[in-house]
Amino acid sequence: MQDPKFELDYDRFDSASEGLREALTSTGNGYFCTRGTAEWEDMSPIHYPGTYVHGIYNRETTIMGGRPVLNEDLVNVSNWLVLKLRIEGQDAVRLDNVDVLSYRHTYDIRRATVARELRFRDRFGRETTLRSRRFVSMAHSHQAGIEWTLVPENWSGQIEVVSALDGRVTNQIVARYRQLEGRHLDPVSPRTFGNETIALRVQTRQSDIYVAEAARTRVFRGEGYDDGPVEVDRSLYQMEDYIQQVLCFDVEQGRPTRVEKMVSLFTSRDNAITEALAASGRHVLRYPDFADAYTEHEAAWDELWDICDVRLPSEPRAHLLLRLHVAHVLQVCSRHTARHDVGVPARGLNGEAYRGHVFWDEMYIYPFLNLRMPEVTRSLLLYRYRRLSEAQAAAEEAGYRGAMFPWQSGSDGTEETQVVHLNPLSGQWDPDLSRNQRHVNAAIFYNVWRFLQATDDTEFLADYGAELMLEIARFWASTAHYNPERERYEIHGVMGPDEFHERHPGASEAGLRNNAYTNVMVAWIMATVPSVLDSLSASRRSALLAQLAVTDEELHTWDDMSRRMFVPFHEGVISQFEGYDELEELDWEHYRAAYPDIQRLDRILRAEGEDPNRFKMAKQADTVMLFFLFDDDELHATFERLGYPYDQDLARRTIEYYDQRTSHGSTLSHVTFAGVLADIHPPSSWERFMVALESDVSDIQGGTTKEGIHMGVMSGTLDLLQSSFVGARVYKGVLLFRPRLVDRLDGVSFSIRFRGTPLRVRIVGNELTVLAQPEGFHGPVRVGLDGQVCELGAGESCVFPLPSQEPSMS
């Protein structure tokens, strides 16, 4: 089947959809990202020209009812997009002050390039075509460019192009945050660098980070790239937080004129600079013209697609959306990212939802990166390691030991979860207890372990990973208590991934008793610690245990916890938490009939005066997560070690039970259920997979995507294909495959890097082939399927017949 096009295409302007389209057509490079807003439009209820830089946070305080509420936000920095067209001295062209004759907005997925073609008639009858093309360079992390091509169709005359940098921006795209302080920038200074270049420096108000942008604007005659720029009249206007040049020149009927705006962006947190404003000006003066810069940008993306492309030609819609998700993941997490001390915002760098904070979504993001660009995962894990001391201090302050990482993390690793949360249905600010989702600590341990399995990066383990993991294990041991009546360890006062249940009904204290997901993860962590220690050299192991003062008694307790954690059951399924079986059943039919969207049932119930804690329901997969994160044999081993029965039907019973009681209020829930249903009910698994794929591009959550794309679901769908459908998992140093939904996977292919060696994986007909590519070969690796294991050398391939024939070597 022919490849689907690498493109999103909108052939008319729709004001109601523009916010969504701006998020989906963002352009970024893993250092900074800019929403796909038209350059000629100002911030308004329709348009939002946001730009976000990894790690640029600022904390502000809002006084609400006499109570100070702190919020730290990923900052919307100065708007570098501003290009405006004025014809014969009239007002600048906007979509709402001209007659739009035709309009097209396209997004080149392969090049992460946003383009528009606008043909319009102004109030004097002049018809003009404006073609715009824009990129944020994947070749050079600080570079971006805009190209306009202007064609006056039935007139000649004088035009003015306003090229500006605007620091008068705030954070305000998320309606439910607008009561919170959104002003994060203070003006510092504008500046010029020669005749063609303007620059602007601003400073974050609390975190004192300088952000500088410089823009060089030139005009060219014709659509070719051979001739140099032409001289035009320029005038300058500047304020302390805004600077513009107005370029004035004549145009001729039918003759194209090009305008190029090349931009550089630096912050005071960047390496190898003396000062951000000087760096931005110096670099932009050295930039080539748009065409040459774009050629370098294309080459950088070509390299990334060689590594990261995911092909599924038998399913064109899925194929297109998988590639869209690859492009967005790489715009947030690229090799440029690895040079900075940053985590992964749950909503990417495309908006301000969740205030740009880092959550547990990393569990869904890292698997795709681990097997393609592990150096990026490594740097993102170091974001956690560098905040270990803050996590240790948080644990001590709460009366625990070890490291307690925050549910929401920003600049320095302190807890950024707010204490109140606005319910948009009721207009009330309700208490926010989600900071009790301590399972984020288990997620970090899990992420380090899966990274090590994929990479065998023993240096990372020795220098950083083992310390992180031991301190997390110590934290869990300090939160648990031994119940002599049960002869089991218990953990109280936490929330699970579900998020609808913050406490037991009628209880005054926050949190739940014995959340099954949390307790099983803790049992697995404690059982994994010996493998972590065994992977270290004897000298490093001794030094680390001494450094952390880990005693033999502690190690014994951890081992005992791996065998005695309490796991609640009821009706033959794993209980979400102790007491879940005593909750009331919800009248799902009533709520589905009464409300068009029940994903956020908690808000609906609270607006009705009900308490969500009373009911058997879940926002997203909770207990079901266990069957997503671990293969059946891994989970069986954990339960067997705990002394709990684990029959072959436990997964099906548990998954079906919670599927009937989950509203899927998080896009991650669709990913999780698609993964766990791959064995149990393949048609339903594929259906959930498609829902997850469509979740952002079709905005299935009713308006949230415009606030920022969902990094977890975009990465999660890519991992679904590789891990749940093709079934690629690392177990005891072997990359094992267990394909499901094979009838949907004909022609699927992708590249991965396993323990340094590049592999090409594909399914054609009833055969799965794994090729060890000779270019970049690191060393022999073992791959397997259905108990058959092959060792691959450079250039060797292994062909596994599906489902049960003998493999062949070539």
Image (cartoon, grey):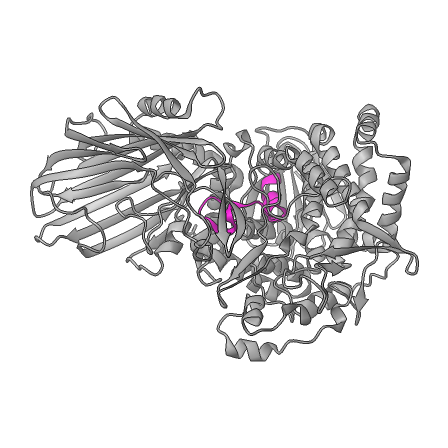
Left or right of 351? Residue 96 is left
* Figure quadrant of the C terminus: top right
Residue under the image location 25 percent in, 40 percent down: 83
* Figure quadrant of the N terminus: bottom left
Specify whether residue 349 is painted magenta: yes
Image coordinates for residue 92, horizontal then vertical, percent: 18, 46
Image coordinates for residue 5, horizontal then vertical, percent: 39, 50
Whether 10 is drawn above or below 530: the answer is below
Please identify the quarter of the rendering in which residue 780 is found: top right
Q: How many marks?
A: 0
The residue closer to the viewer here, 742 or 271, is 271
Whether 584 is drawn above or below 221: the answer is below
Residue 315 visible in image? no
The residue closer to the viewer here, 145 or 198, is 198
Image coordinates for residue 557, horizontal then vertical, percent: 88, 44
Magenta stretch, residue numbers: 347-370
Image coordinates for residue 273, horizontal then vertical, percent: 45, 21
Residue under the image location 82 percent in, 61 percent down: 646
The residue closer to the viewer here, 536 or 728, is 536
Residue 153 visible in image? yes
Residue under the image location 52 percent in, 79 percent down: 593
Specify the farthest residue to the front.
66
Left or right of 602? Residue 228 is left
Residue under the image location 41 percent in, 45 percent down: 109
Specify whether residue 293 is painted magenta: no
The residue closer to the viewer here, 558 or 75, is 75
